[in-house]
Amino acid sequence: MINRYSLVDDESGLTIGKSLDLVGLTGNLIGTVGDENFHKIMLIHFRYNVEFVAYCKEKKISINNIEITILDHEENPIGSYYFVLRESL
């Protein structure tokens, strides 16, 4: 199976993980918390990158800003979208 998307931590530049598919990038899923609306994006069959998990445990970091990267058929990046998370991970 070919991953079509990757999630990248903006601060470290490390790949958080990869996904086979993604739903909501077009803005068709809107969530509301209190009086704030936000885009809901779901990564289908997401798998964490083992190196990134080890890095997080060692550095005890939190993730605030991410890039969703679109991958070609060889899993090379061909474009990305920058996002600020509503809550840190």
Image (cartoon, rainbow, N blue to C red):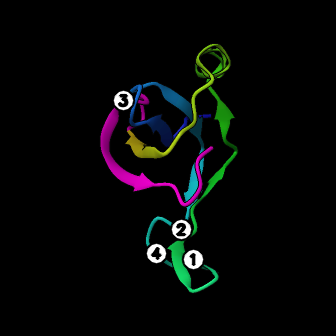
Where is residue 63, by image quadrant? top right
Q: Quadrant of the N terminus?
A: top right
Q: Compute the Cα span from label 4 to label 3.
A: 24 Å
Residue pictured at 50% horizontal, 40% vertical: 7
Q: Which residue is mark 3?
A: 76
Which secondary structure, mark 3? loop
Mark number for residue 27?
Answer: 4
Tell me residue 84's x, y (percent): 43, 55
Mark number for residue 29?
Answer: 1
Of pointers 2 and 1, the one earlier in the residue sequence: 2
Q: Compute the Cα span from label 3 to label 1.
A: 27 Å
Q: Say which amino acid is labelled 1.
A: Leu
48 to 22, vertically: above or below = above
In the image, is 53 to the left or to the right of 81? right
Which secondary structure, mark 4? loop
Residue pictured at 54% horizontal, 37% vertical: 3
Mark number for residue 24?
Answer: 2
Other residues around mark 1 within 10 Å, as few (<14) / some (14–19) / many (≥20): few
Of pointers 3 and 1, the one earlier in the residue sequence: 1
Tell me residue 42's x, y (percent): 62, 59
- Between residue 33 and residue 46, name the one nearer to us: 33
Q: Compute the Cα span from label 2 to label 1.
A: 5 Å
4 to 83, vertically: above or below = above
Residue pictured at 61% horizontal, 24% vertical: 49
